[in-house]
Structures are given as C-alpha cells and as structure tokens.
Image (cartoon, helix red, strand yellow):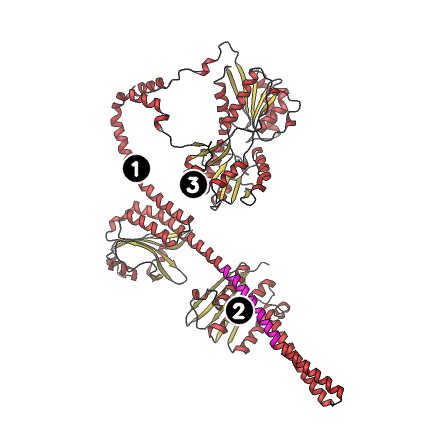
Amino acid sequence: MLTLIILTIVVLFNLPLNCPAAIATHNSEIKNVLVLHASHKGLSWNDRLSNGIESVFSQSQFPVRIFYEYMDTDRIFDNQHVQNLYELYKHKFSIVKFDAAIVTDDRAFQFMLNYHSRLLPGTPVIFCGVNYFASYDLYGQSNFTGIVQTIDIDETLDLVLTLTPKVRNAFVVVDKTPTSIAAIQLFIENMHTYQDRLSFYFNEDMDMRELINTVAELPTDWVVIVVNFIVDKSGQTYSIEQSTQMITQKAKVPVYSFWDSYLGNGIIGGKLISGLGQGKQSAQMVLKVFEGESPSQIDIIRESPNEYMFDYHVLEKFQIDMELLPEDSKIINKPSNIYNEYKTVIWSILIGFVLFIVIIFTLLINIFRRRQAEIIQKKYSNQLEIQNKIDRAILEAKPTEKIANDALKYVRNLFQCRRVSVILFDYEQRYAVVLAVNCDHQTTIGEKTKFPLKNFPVDDLKEGNIIYANDIISITEKSIVDKALIAEKINAYVRIPLMYHGTLIGALTLGHSDFSVFSDEKIETVKQISTSLALAIQATIFVNNILHRERDLKKMSAILIRSQEDERKKISLELHDEFGQALTAMNMSVSLLEKKVISGQLNDHKIIELLHDITGSIHTMADQIRDLSHELRPPMLDVLGLLPALKAHITSFQKRTGISVQLMAEQCEAKLPPEIEINLFRIIQEALHNVVKHASSSEVAISLQRYHNNIHLTITDNGKGFHIPDAHSIENTMGIGILGMQKRSTNLGGNFNIYSTVNIGTRIVVELPLNE
C-alpha cells in the first residue's frame, strides 16, 4: 500500500502539462500506415526504425494506425520465400486500405518495387535503410521517395586513426548479406586513401567460433570494424546484439561499426547510421504526403542522418581521451548530474519523505549487505588492479623484473607475509634463478641468486600442484633453499607453479613465520595472479628474444659487409702474390727463351730446361687457381653431392692441421636439395675453421643423420670451450662464425643450437627440414 501511494505521488508530479498525442483532431480520419521490415521481428535495427516512426506519428495532427510486417529475409531468402510472402500479403492487404507504406532496407524496397502495382496500387511508398539505390530504380514509379542509407567510411576511419593512432591494421567483419556487400564495395573504393596508414583485411567465410577466435588473437596494432555478421557460413543466424557481444567480449582491441544498433554491445562507436533518425525522417515524409504533397515532389534524401556516437564505458576501457571526440558527439552510458536529470522525481520524493520512514529498517539491512559486497568488490578490485598493472607492463614492454616486483608487492600486502619471490627454472643449465624478491628483512636469497634445480620439486610443480610447507624445521631432508629460509626465520611457505600453456617456467613462493596466514581464499587469488604473471614473464621474454634477433640482424649486416671486404682482399692478395709472381716468372722465362732462340745460343737441352721451368710455373698456377676455386665453391659438391665433398674437405683438413676428424653419416647417401647441401657444407666448413682458430682441440666428431623428413647435424670437439655470451659480439671473430651458421640454419626454417663448457669442449646441433 505504501509503495502504491509513493508511486502515485511520483506519477502525479511527473505528468506533462499537455499531451501532444491528444491534440489530434477527433474528427480526423484515421490513417493506416504499413511498415514493412525486411528483417525479422526483434532485430534492434528494426526496433530503432519503428521507435523513430512512432515518435513522429505520436506528435502529429493525424491519428495514425501502424501495421507492422516482418519479411524475415535476413534468415530466409529464396524465390519460394518471396513468392510465399507475395501470396500472404496479397490476401492481407486486400482487407485493409493503406494510406501510405514505409519499407525498410534493400530487400523490402526491391520487393515493393516488384509487387507495388499488385499489392498496393496507388499507395505512396517511403523507403529507408536502402544501400543499393540508383535513380533508374524508380523509372515509371511516381509514388516512391525516401532515404538512401550512406555509410561514412572516411569519417569513421579518420576517427579510428585519431582515437587510436598506433593502429596500422583493420579487420573488417562482414557476412554475405546485401548490407555487407554494399559496405565492401565502399571499402574498396576508399582503401587507396589509407594505403600508407591502414591495411584492411576482410574475414573469410567463417562460422561464429572461427570468427571470434580470429578476433581474440589480433595484436594491439589492430582494430575491428563490424559491418554485419548475422549469418555465418553454417547458416546459423544471430541477432545484432548477440553477434556484436560475442565479438567484443573476445576482442582485446577496439571495435568500431557504422550502425547505432551495435552501440551498447561493446563497440566504441563511430560515425553511425541512426535507425532512429531514419525512422523519424521517413515518418515526416509520410506526414507531408498526408498534407497533400505527391511523393514525386518530395526530394529523395541521399545522405542518411548519421551521427558521431560512442559508448562511455568502452572509451574508458581502452583509455581513449574524450577530448579527441568530435564536438557534436553523443555519448551513451555517460555518468550524468543526477539532480538535473531527476529534479522532479527528487522533489516528489522529498514531499513524500515522511512515507519512507517506515522503510528505514529495510535500508539499514541493504546498507549492511552493500558493505559486505564492497568488501568482496574491493578484493576483486585489488586483484583486477594488479592484473591490469601486469597487462599494462606487457604493453609498455617493461622489464621482467619490474613486472614481477609490482606483482610481489601486491601479493605481500594481501597476505602480510614476510617474504615473496619469483623463481625461474632453466632446464638446459639445470639451475633455478631468483627473478624478483620482496621481503621485510635483509636476505641472502636476493635477485639473480642461483640454485641447482634439484632443490625444487619440479615434477610436482609441473603437474600444477601447489607445494605447502607448514613447518620447514621439521623437514628431514632440507634443501639449500630450506636452510636459507630457516636462517631468515621463515618457518612456512607456499610455492605456486608459474605455468604458461601447460609448461612450468618457474614458481611464486610465499614465506612467513605463521602458516595460518595462507588461507584457501587468498591462495586462490594468488593462483589467478600467478597465471597472469607467467603470461607476462613469457611475453616479456618473447619480446626480448625479438629485440635480440634484431640486434643479431644488425650484427649480421655489419659482418656481411666486412666478410665481403675480407674475401675480396684475400682474392686480391692471392691474385697479386701467387698468380702475379707466377705470370712474371713465366714471362721472364719466355723472353729469355725468345732471345736465346733468336741469337742461336740455345741447344736442345737448354730449350727443354727452359720449357720445363715454364711448364712447372703453369702447373703451380693451375693448382693455386684450383685451390682458390675449391675454397669459393667446391665443384665436387655440385657433381657428386654432399658426402663426397665433405670427405674430400675433411681429408684435406686433416692433412693441413693434423686434427683427427670422424665423419658418421646415416641415410645420407642420396643427393639432397642444393640449398641444403651447400649450407650444410658451409656450416661444417665454418665449424672446422673455428676449431683450428679457437678451440685448440685434437679430435672432432661430425654426425650427419637423415630421419623422417629432417637432416640432423652434430659437430663435437674436445677443445678448450668458451662462455657463449662472450662470443656474441661483433668484434669477436668466433661470434661472426656462430652468427653466420645460425643465420644459414634459420633461413632454411631450421634450428641452430650451440653448447659449450670451458675446458671440456663445444657441441653444435643443427636440424633442417627437408621439403621433398
């Protein structure tokens, strides 16, 4: 009863002083208006058009009765369906006489063009939402006028580049509906304008799952532009709200569109076609007809009423500066001034304030519940805050240690524990290293501290199990880490695995003197944080690897130039020192022979001796030319293949250096693709060169195996070894050779790895795919 009284007071205070709908003349004849929608009932686009139509008619001087029909051609469209609609409407429209008709979208427009004379002869027709329109469509049709729907592609794309300037790629979502086809044509006409700023990619024929998975994987320099996706390749239909929400929920990048019916479903907005605006304009045209104008006298509106519209929540989500929005923009979901918006309601409530005393007790209960909710909200808010920090750190390419330290600060505050740390596992080197630590005391286990991997329960952690230790002192077999924690008066710890796509990369360890602080609820929160942290660490490592590769490419460019110059210098010296001297000696011998012959001072023995000297010089020069050509490109490799060329090279290498080389080859007798053979030969040649120059080894073992569709090469020496990072400098000639071998391997889609231990030796492992 009290509620009914309150509502009555509110309604009385909010009643308008006049009602325009009631102004209509009572004696006016009721006008029957048909609204023919091309799509199905319930589509938000149709609803907006209908709302616009109704808002105009409700304020007009003519009493209007609206008849809605839905063709459902967005879900069913074939000749039989069109024929069935014609037969149905032929019967229905014969019963009611319409004073005007409004048709929405292309298929309803085309349907009415084809059947107007049979279904509604003489009835004025107003069209709206039409993409495909040409003036000749109305040839012989004097009773048609309306609004052509235009997509503002340029304005929306300019807006994309203004609001999200780092974007370089646009993923355009379309289906096979006429709306999408018309939009694709407009994109093609406008793409050249943005060729240096945006690249456009249209989705292939996909089902919804394929589409949202593709959208979910788009990098940060992409945006999504939704044209239409209400029917997928399997024939499954979706409402605009359904498809848009499914896309925006998966997208990690901003989503734009061209229709206001998509707004409020996760898109940022854009220069949007207003269904409400088109509905109003089409209804206003109908009123002009009711006032006596002929449709042929009413100009066709060729620019639809498009507006800049945006969703406040989505702008906030992507941290877009609202100062960049156009001045006439409309923003939905924007917080408003409550008093100005609800002034009448507030005064009504004040007048009836005494009536609300009875519900104070209920409000107190709600306050208590709200406080409980705020506690829960704060917990999740803190959790989201740290996850957002981690996400921002990834986007800002912050160092791994910085990301980890930010997360540890939050975790330690959550548990009020004495120590938290992130430890990463290096399976190749078999050790664990402390990446970051946050504690309330001096620690001996600081950042970059290393421990043998055996000190951690790696197998249990790989299974995703959380390791609990409620009393470290009672552990019988204490590890080095356990003893260090006891020294710092840490009596209990929890170790949470850091997993990335099912792979264990490390652990998040929480230490305290009291195990009771580790509640299940808090542990669950930290588990979620550890998932984000593992992703952040792996992403940062990935970025660092990319940067490292970029530096290697720069090194390789410098190396290539220097190598070319060194090779040219070497060939030049060979030609000058060896061939030049040999040719000079031959020239002197020939000149001497000529003089002696002319003067008659030579006998046969002297001639033969001089000719023998000349022949020897020629043979020497030929050998030198052969050695030089073999070094540049061994002809045996092209004629006989890899194995014979390797054996010949190894034999020559052993004679020249005295180093023993063992070659083991399995399943490698057949010739391999030329690019595989020459690169394997060069890798082995470079490795042997490094052995002589740097390794001081006495034995080298080369294993070449072919299995399945791969070639596996291993080169092992017993030399003095080296520290691998020291070799990766442009000044280090050994580093030049390593980078060259690595580049040859990766250019062929293979893998290159090098392992070395000081005073033990070096092992090179190369694996190349064979594309038969």
Please indicate whether residue 771 sits to the left or right of residue 612 in the image: left
State how far apart marks 2 and 3 are (Cα).
52 Å
| 361 in the magenta segment | no
Q: Position of residue 270 (x, y in %)?
A: 49, 35
142 vs 262, nearest the viewer: 142
Residue picked out by circle 1: 374
Q: Quadrant of residue 180?
A: top right
Residue picked out by circle 2: 686
Quadrant of the drawing holding the N terminus: top left
Q: Residue at x 54, y 78 (%)?
A: 656
Going by the numbered disc 3, the residue's amino acid type is: Phe
Could you tell me how many numbered marks the image carries? 3
Residue picked out by circle 3: 318
Relative to 228, say whether 114 is above or below. Answer: above
Quadrant of the drawing holding the C terminus: bottom right
Q: Residue at x 66, y 22 (%)?
A: 140
In what element is the residue under mark 3?
Answer: loop
Going by the numbered disc 2, the residue's amino acid type is: Glu
Q: Is residue 41 visible?
A: no
Q: Which residues are magenta?
A: 552-577
Sequence order check: which comes first, mark 1 or mark 3?
A: 3
Characterize the magenta stretch by its predominant secondary structure.
Answer: helix
Q: Position of residue 29 (x, y in %)?
A: 53, 11
Q: Position of residue 210 (x, y in %)?
A: 51, 42
Going by the numbered disc 1, the residue's amino acid type is: Glu
